[in-house]
Amino acid sequence: LRDCSDKRVLGVFLNLNFAAPFFLVLLWLRPVTKHYLTVRVFSGMQGPIMTENAFDILRILLIVVVVLLRVALMPFYLQSYLNIAERRVQEQRREAGRITNRDLQKKIAAVFYYMCVVALQYIAPILLCLFFGLMYKTLGEYSWSNIFDTTGVIFEEECPVEAKPPAPLGEEDSVLRSAQEITLAIGSLKQVLTKEVARGVFGFATWWICFSWFSSSALGLVYQSYFTQV
């Protein structure tokens, strides 16, 4: 924000980018959002605003939007970090005393050496949040068209798993036999890890990633605002 103080529109997007994970966390709190959108019937309406399936897919869509926003603003954050080197030089000029060229070069080079770590800290929560969000959609058997769902009914096609794998073409074809056994094992695993289980597991994982994401950002803001000045 210090480097973009003269750009109000960019400042709005930067503040929105910081608060976006907090709004994603609120979407998983039933009394705050889900109850009002999927359960409560407001006056003048015959039913709730959204079905549960539409609300779930809305959360996933908002995760994708937040990820795209964060990726679009990534160059500004990295450039702001690189500007630390310039501020260190300016602070050194205001300080009394002397410093060798080697020490000054170390102070400036340390900023660039840490650049990869900063980029990783920025992009890792984005990838984790996007990964768990898409796994939540895929294994939860959601569809993007559920956002327009008004009935809450999803038509599903059952695909029963065979009791035993079909006989391989030949006794020597061990590769085909192994592939058939793996396919049968995956099919049996799907009968245990149903969509209800996947929705619960990946829904909680997505919420936890968003909560950790915002918490770490908030703690970093508090540290940079108060403790670095001590």
Image (spheres, helix red, strand yellow):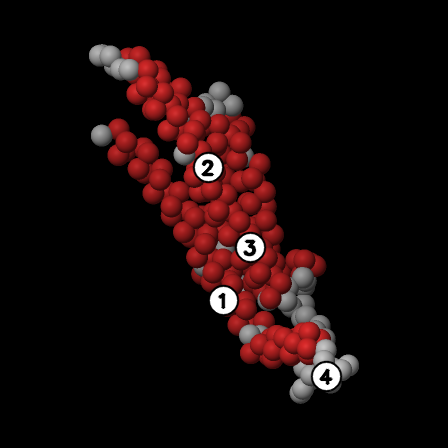
In whole angstroms, how far apart are the C-alphas of marks 4 and 3? 41 Å
As rendered, which of 55 and 41 lies closer to the eye?
Answer: 55
Instruction: Classify mark 3: helix, strand or loop.
Output: helix
Q: Amino acid at mark 4?
A: Glu
Counting residues from the start of the chain, the first of labels 1 and 4 encountered is 4
Q: Give the residue at mark 3.
A: 131
Does residue 121 sit above or below 141 in this rendering? Answer: above
Expressed as whole percent of the image width and height from the top left, the position of residue 180 reads: 68, 77
In whole angstroms, how far apart are the C-alphas of marks 2 and 3? 21 Å
**Which residue is at 43% across, 39% downward?**
117
How many C-alpha atoms fall within 10 Å of the one at disc 2: few (<14), some, or many (≥20)? few
**Which residue is at 53% across, 57% downward?**
132
Q: Give the residue at mark 1.
A: 201
Instruction: Classify mark 2: helix, strand or loop.
Output: helix
**Which residue is at 76% across, 82% downward?**
170
Q: Give the residue at mark 2.
A: 116
Which image quarter is the C terminus in?
top left
Q: Amino acid at mark 1?
A: Val
Counting residues from the start of the chain, the first of labels 1 and 3 encountered is 3
Q: Nearer the viewer, mark 2 or mark 3?
A: 2
As rendered, which of 100 and 130 lies closer to the eye?
Answer: 100
Q: Residue farthest to the front?
A: 172
Q: Amino acid at mark 3?
A: Phe
**Which residue is at 43% across, 57% downward?**
208
Q: Give the residue at mark 4.
A: 171
Left or right: where does residue 179 sit relative to residue 125?
Answer: right
Counting residues from the start of the chain, the first of labels 2 and 3 encountered is 2
Q: Nearer the viewer, mark 4 or mark 3?
A: 4
